[in-house]
Image (cartoon, helix red, strand yellow):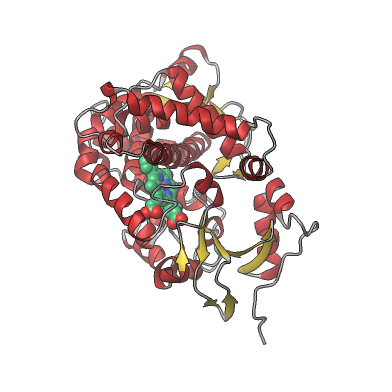
Amino acid sequence: MRPSFPPIALPKWPAVGALPKLAVGPREFLDANQARHGDIFATTILGQKIVFFTHPRHVQHIRVNNSRKYSAGKGNPIAHLIFPDGIITTDGKKWRDRRRAAQPYFTPSHLETIFPAIDSSIRKNLTPFEESATNGAPCNIRECASSITISVITEAMLGARVSRDDLEKIISAIDYITNHPLRFFAQATLLENLQIPWRTRAQESLSLFSTVVRNILNDPNNQSHGSILRIYARDPLQSRAISNILELILAGYESTECVLTWILLHIAHSPDLQRRLALEIDQSIGNGEPDPGNIRELKHLHMTLHEALRMYPPAYLLWSQCTETDTVDDLTIEAGTRAVISIFHTQRHPSAWTSPGRFVPARFEHDDTIAEHRRNGSFTPFGTGSRQCIGQRLANSEILLAVIRILQRYRLCPTAPTSRLPNPDLRISLRPLGKIQLLASHR
Ligand code: HEM
């Protein structure tokens, strides 16, 4: 007979539960528990019961077929601290209203309108590639991807002019939160509740972030016609407007940066892949101007993007809270339990993918592959069901366009012939571990 609740990964220190293990190595924690207990396992963190799910069928069960028994909005405790009033962190009517207000700014026709602005944000951030090609010095790929994606979200999407200084402040605040999510969480909740009068890095990051966003919101030059900022600026509750903008910046910046970094790394480390992509771009666009039409033709580039999203889904944990007792694989999930799906595992699950740890864009060669894997829950890098990512098209367009602009001009290679691809580091999103440098040369 199966247990009525998934096996517990026993915590070493009962008061904090699995927090230390999860904080030190989320990947080791998830891998070890999956190997030991199977595709569902549970633990406690600070007294809260958390169940982890790692099989593709769980994605369908929780996010599609039984989504009414789960609150996606209440799921993610860190998102709640930063933007409690956003699309990601609300449910029901509040969520519908927020999502409907933002939706027009993510349609294909709006994205076509802002396409030149996306392109311009990308091109002005390619200087480090040019410098590397000119003087042979390594180029820090993460920093480049980071400047590209923060510019796209603030300038092209929000339509705001933000000083370099303010952009750097945003990046450093996000870096702190994403590099130390559990420390951030502990500082922002425990110390706050205990009313300890230290000014913590968590508080500093949040207040710095809010100040920059408030400046963006209050600058009348930033509310150009057709920009989403206009909608938020009209909100009588400024704290809600700030929360909404913070959410778009946070959700849209780091995830996109991670995927772009992984693609550039694979291109540099695989001369075959690079040749193939460069040839495809030469044949369809050459040195001319990319547009949404000719980008759609680049089949191999799309396959590469899908494979990067499969192997390195930046939002690799889908959080929700069970609101009505549910049964998953014969196991009872009680109301109040946090349900966390690891799509890092579902997208590498051996039941759905052959050689899941290998980067093979060709697995997406057939047009129906994505639909099939989406249906069985094994390819959901942007989530699935009604809470799917609103920024999916924006993210895809900017990543594809950035790779095109880079490969039109440069050849990429690792800094040393012996250097290897970095391992993924599971934090808030899924970054490559260590210092990420490449060399660029002119084509
Ligand atoms: C490669 C880039 C991106 C990836 C992989 C990604 C992934 C995801 C995932 C997995 C979810 C669903 C979370 C859940 O169900 O719990 C999500 C939701 C969301 N994403 Fe993205 N995202 C990306 C880029 C963006 C961008 C560019 C924006 C906006 C500028 C954005 C805004 C949002 C919002 C607002 C939601 C909440 C949707 C809802 O609850 O209705 N994302 N994203």
Residue 108, image x, y percentages: 22, 45
Residue 4 picture quarter = bottom right
Direction from residue 373 to residue 205 in the image, left or right:
right
Residue 175, image x, y percentages: 56, 33
* Image quadrant containing the N terminus: bottom right
What count of labels does the image hold?
0
Residue 386, image x, y percentages: 35, 61
Residue found 52% across the figure and 30% down from its top: 207
Seen from the viewer's position, the closer of residues 373 and 66 is 66
Residue 281 picture quarter = top left
Residue 327, image x, y percentages: 53, 78
Residue found 76% across the figure and 64% down from its top: 10
* Image quadrant containing the C terminus: top left
Seen from the viewer's position, the closer of residues 88 and 350 is 88
In the picture as drawn, the residue positioned furthest to the bottom comes out as 1
Direction from residue 1 to residue 178 in the image, left or right:
left
